[in-house]
Image (spheres, rainbow, N blue to C red):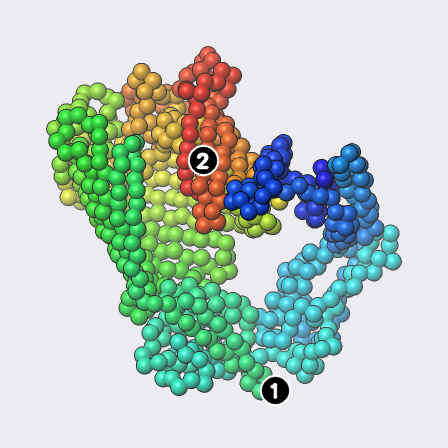
Amino acid sequence: MLASVKLKSDSRRLSLGEYRLLVRQEPNARWFQLLKVPLGIYCLQGNDSTKRFNRFIRRIGEAPVIYDESLTDYSIQAIDAALKNKGYLHSRVTIDTLQRGHKVHLTYNIHPGMRYYVGNIRYEYDNDTVRLLVEADSSNSQLYKGMPLDASALNAERTRIVNLLRDKGYYNFHKEFVTFVADTAVADYGVDLTLRMARPHNVDSARAYRTYRLRDVNIYEETVPGEPSDTTSYKGVNMYYNDRIKIFRRVYSNHNYIRPDSLYRATDLRDTYSSINSLSPISYSTIRYREAGEDSTLLDCDINVKLNKTNNISAEVEGTNTSGDLGAAVVLTFANRNTFRGAESLSLKLRGAYEAIKGLEGYNNQNYIEYSAELGLRFPTLMVPFVSSQKKQAIKGTSEVSIMYDSQNRPEFHRRVLTAAWTYRWAPTFAPGWQHRLDLLSMNYVFMPWISDTFREEYLNSDDPLYAVLRYTYEDLFIVKTGYSFTYNSLKTVTGNGLYHTNGFQIRFNVETAGNVLYGLSSLFKAQRTTDGQYSLFDIAYSQYAKIDFDYAKSFVIDDRNSIALHAAVGVGIPYGNSTILPYEKRYFAGGANSVRGWGVRELGPGSYVGNDGNIDYINQTGNVKLDLSVEYRSHLFWKIHGAAFIDAGNIWNTRNYTDQEGGLFKFNRFYKQIAVAYGLGLRLNLDYFIIRLDGGMKAINPAVESGSGHYPILHPKLSRDFAFHFAVGLPF
């Protein structure tokens, strides 16, 4: 058996993690680098392979890794080749084999030697026009004197030149035109690098450096060239269809970057593929270029489009469990992918839910009933004035209008929610990693038509200051807000199972404001204030606040089974003007499956606050400042099961000193003393389409207890007091 594999290097500058991935045979996997549990599971199977249990154990376990010397030789060759590609031209890789009984221990000894660097750079061209184009773009070159002789950098430079020339009309230009020659004889560790651009021998000399322009651009909707069809044209593009064109010509034109009488550009091909395939009525498309003649410098382009079915109806059945109260819901969804023949996507969602509530005293009806209807219409472009179609093409955006009505009848109260929004989303072609969203106008109207006498007397009319936030939550509410958010994601899959094996980071930012325009108009026209000193709209005091959120996540690959993920999130929302507190839906809470996992949902904070007699107070345990920090070690265990070990930290605070919320105020000189810390283990079931997650967290530092053993439960753990279990879908970050 192969018992262990180690890598050693003579040079500290060498990152062994990069070369570990090139080892062709690894020993049996260890859970968190400690125990070979998958091998132990495999050994539980019996000898009878016809039994279903034995086959299942074989599938989820891991067979013993039998040492294969040929794979070791392949690994040595792969590591040595990678070193030479990085400029270590005199590298050597040796192997130490230690056999103890029936176990083999391998050590790969890497001797990289001195690295070669580029001393001089020369360029050779066999075409003057190409030379002038490349020299004009030399500021973007990847090559420079003193750079390491790195094959990946040379390949990046070759790709840059190929993309540059293919965007200048050189249809037949490809990577074989660009080669490099490195002369290592000129100095001890210096290299004379020559970049050669020359026509390969198998390329026609007459067509090698020929630039092409587009002649005919044809779009075939549900038909193919040569079949009988109807035809029309729009802005010089020929369109072929049967009976009636299904999508308006202007929509095709706005999403097609390939224009007649324009220079051939490979970028236009990629953008057209992406843009046309993003239209909801289109199932897929193919794009083909044809030379107009053997001696011609013209190209014809055929774009073939296959459409989806226009209408779709789906139904879902949900089961609900709210603190032990069981219920069910039915959701019906109707979608039309081409509502007005402009590739608009219309969706109508109807939802009905019922839940049997038990344990409530003093209420007549013990059931919860909810009905909702949501209507959305998405346009395949930015619906904004004074913006040209060319700029809209570059932005690649969509517009969406939505409206929803939700009716909730609980034993304690009836609640009606009406929301409407106009939203823009876009991802520029020149920066595809950035996704932007602008909520130009979003309105939220909450109406409480009925509140039971029992609920009103016990909570809303009570003089207990504990329910100050609760009373605000159950008032009629009107929010008119504008918000902007962006997401940048640089994550790239490396190898193996893509669940954890990514190197990169993700940034999310969101800012929103509400009530400013209404407050300005109210002040300008000197509107009447309520008895609480607030302006109102339709006899409802509207909210006014500003809110900013920032979220950062980063992952590091260790090997093909292990990685580390980091996460940091901070948010602050400030009520002002017409409001003294954030709307409940906009406030932060701490604890739960995606926060500090040693606490349950809304069990932590704000600050060192704790409910009366130590009880959980869901309403008051909210805040308008949030901090979340996490580090998670992730490991593939066996089969579809993954594991995690994590440490979480964070809390929430308030920027105003609310009544009977002692310790909840954010102060710079003490907030760091109120940061809660938790640790724990988790399991993930990776079902490819989604992930089922089980996490168990233990409190390590509890800010609700300011001193003594209760402040550091990590030193005095108590399972009944400090443990929290979480079931969730998806990763925490």
Provide the secondary structure element on which disc 2 rests: strand
Q: Position of residue 521 (x, y in %)?
A: 22, 45
User: Quick one: 540 or 456, which is closer to the camera?
Assistant: 456
**Is residue 124 at least partly visible in the picture?**
yes
Does residue 566 appear to the left or right of 593 in the view shown?
right
Instruction: Give the number of the disc on residue 694.
Output: 2
User: Quick one: 562 or 503, which is closer to the camera?
Assistant: 562
User: Quick one: 407 or 549, which is closer to the camera?
Assistant: 407
Exactly how many numbered labels are in the figure? 2
Q: Position of residue 379 (x, y in %)?
A: 33, 62
Q: Position of residue 667 (x, y in %)?
A: 41, 24
Does residue 80 appear to the left or right of 547 in the view shown?
right
Screen quadrant of the N terminus: top right
User: Quick one: 503 or 714, which is closer to the camera?
Assistant: 714
Q: Residue at x 47, y 69 (%)?
A: 272
Residue linked to disc 1: 294
**Is residue 520 at least partly visible in the picture?**
no
Occupied quadrant, residue 168: bottom right
Instruction: Give the number of the disc on residue 249.
Output: none
State the separation of the CA atoms marked 1 and 2: 64 Å
- In the rendered image, the vertical position of residue 366 relative to residue 224, given as above or below: above
Does residue 13 appear to the left or right of 573 in the view shown?
right
Q: Residue at x 70, y 81 (%)?
A: 205
Provide the secondary structure element on which disc 1 rests: loop
Q: Residue at x 52, y 76 (%)?
A: 288
Marked residue nearer the N-terminal end (1 or 2): 1
Type of the residue with mark 1: Glu
Task: Say few, some or many: other residues with alpha carbon within 10 Å of mark 2 (under 14 / 14 to 19 / 20 or more).
Answer: some
Residue furthest toward the top?
708
